[in-house]
Amino acid sequence: MGKSEYVFLNQYDEPVLPMSTNFHVWKPALKEAGLQPRSLYQTRHTFATLMLDAGEHPGWVQKMMGHETMQMIYEKYYSYIKNYERDEGSAFMKHVYNPVAEKNEVDPDKALREGDPKGTPKERESGPQILTP
């Protein structure tokens, strides 16, 4: 088997035909799994939502989907774009407002007592904090 410009080839080294795959593979697989019929094309949306929900960068998802711009990603999938790694605004607080915290390991309770505006995660959930320099 040599190189091909196609990703998926059949047993004859020819490109897999979408209609054939849909009829012989996709629909039987859905039926076997007990799932409602849906088009194979809809898996693009499943891919995008799963990737964004898992925290993948929207720009990477845009490239994988083949979109020219981010507009489609933000219009269709904005609610799936999550930020699990940090609280919004915490990058600014960590690197600009309080750059010393990056260098030293800080006890959250001690930091709160000494005026760290972020406090502990539980305390941040209770509502907005008044920030004073």
Image (cartoon, rainbow, N blue to C red):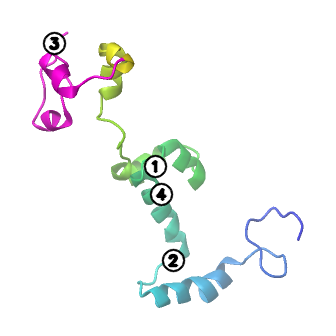
Residue 66 in view, yes or no: no
State the separation of the CA atoms marked 4 and 1: 8 Å
Going by the numbered disc 3, the residue's amino acid type is Thr
Going by the numbered disc 1, the residue's amino acid type is Ile
Classify mark 2: helix, strand or loop.
loop
**Residue under label 4:** 48
- Which comes sooner in the sequence, label 4 or label 3? 4
State the separation of the CA atoms marked 4 and 3: 41 Å
Where is residue 11 drawn, in percent x and y?
80, 82
Going by the numbered disc 4, the residue's amino acid type is Ala
Q: Is residue 125 magenta?
A: yes
Q: Residue at x 16, y 33 (%)?
A: 124
From the image, which quarter does the N terminus lie in? bottom right
- The magenta-colored residue range is 104-133
Q: Residue at x 42, y 53 (%)?
A: 54
On the picture, is 42 further left or further right than 106? right
Residue at the extreme left: 126
State the separation of the CA atoms marked 4 and 2: 16 Å
Q: Residues within 10 Å of mark 4 (few under 14, many from 20)?
A: many
Classify mark 1: helix, strand or loop.
helix
**Residue under label 3:** 132
**Residue under label 2:** 39
Classify mark 4: helix, strand or loop.
helix
- Which comes sooner in the sequence, label 4 or label 1? 4
Report the disc number at residue 73. 1
Residue at the extreme top: 133
Between disc 2 and disc 3, the foreground one is 3
Between disc 4 and disc 3, the foreground one is 3
Task: Tell me, yes or no, whether the two marked residues, 4 and 1, touch with CB atoms within 8 Å.
Answer: yes
Q: Residue at x 66, y 77 (%)?
A: 18
